[in-house]
Image: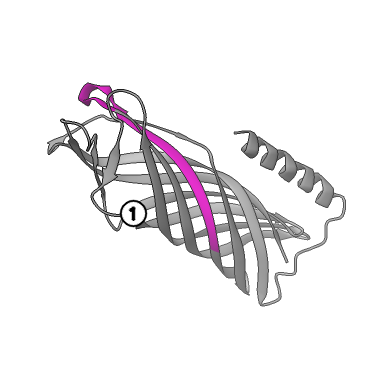
Amino acid sequence: MKRIITVICMALLWILTVQAQIQELNVSKRFNWGIRLGVNAPLVDIRHLTLNGNKVDESDSESRLGLSGSFIGRYNFKKHYIQLEVGMHQFHTRLYNPDYELRKINTSAYTLDVPILYGYNITKHGPYLMNLFAGPRVSYIFNEISTTGGSFRNLIYDESPNSFSFYLIGGLSTTIGHLYIDFRYAYCVGNSKDLSFKVNPDELQTSQVKLSRAVNELSISIGYLW
């Protein structure tokens, strides 16, 4: 959390600095390039969970803010643009269900993201722009899962947890000179595979868990365009 607060404070200082000398972004040229940094709030959607073959309903989940960043390439035509991004982000979630002795399965996930966005400039007044955008995103997910609490001490995947996720993105962005700010929501359409793992594999009692979930995201970011 301290890192996130530091990033936000640095971003606000940057905004105040660039406000002193606003230079209009040239959107009449064919290409703009940029970078963006931000924070995201993961929203966990548990779609299917079984423990030893029995369906588990109403499992609880928690999440906390993560960081994100990407490089931007934008192709302009009239009041429209196509924006390609390549970046990474992280999120942290926790799954638990005390009724089934499923305690605190923590996930720290890191993803490589490639969104392709269509944008439309709804307003332009001097150095100020406002845009609506939408499009798909493909994410390659790296998972690191550990367990804490209760009797669960070990966890072993049946196969590699790495997978692809597919998203639909919609949002609103604005530019003030070269400063770029966006708000976006990413809805997870699906994953290339579900998670399957065993807990307590070294104990007499072993539990088999199969998990199908989606992690939707609400994020805000700032950046700079050239």
The quarter of the picture where residue 224 lies is: bottom right
Q: Is residue 4 above or below residue 167?
A: above
**Residue 194, image x and y in percent?**
26, 50
x 74%, y 43%: residue: 10
| Mark 1, other Cα within 10 Å: few <14 / some 14–19 / many ≥20 | some
Left/right of residue 52 with respect to residue 26 in the rendered view: left
Front residue of 62/180: it is 62
> Which residue reaches farthest left?
53
> Which residue reaches farthest right?
20
**Residue 208, image x and y in percent?**
18, 39
The quarter of the picture where residue 85 lies is: bottom right
x 83%, y 56%: residue: 22
Front residue of 204/101: it is 204
Left/right of residue 101 with respect to residue 76 in the rendered view: left
Left/right of residue 44 with respect to residue 132 in the rendered view: left
Instruction: Check disc 1 and report the residue beneath it.
Output: 189
State yes or no: residue 95 in magenta: yes
Q: Is residue 81 above or below residue 137?
A: below
Q: Which residues are magenta?
A: 86-102
Magenta stretch prevailing secondary structure: strand
x 27%, y 44%: residue: 156
Q: Is residue 38 above or below residue 146?
A: below
Which amino acid does the dot numbered 1 rest on?
A: Val
**Residue 222, image x and y in percent?**
66, 50
Q: Tell me the quadrant of the picture where the C terminus can be found.
A: bottom right
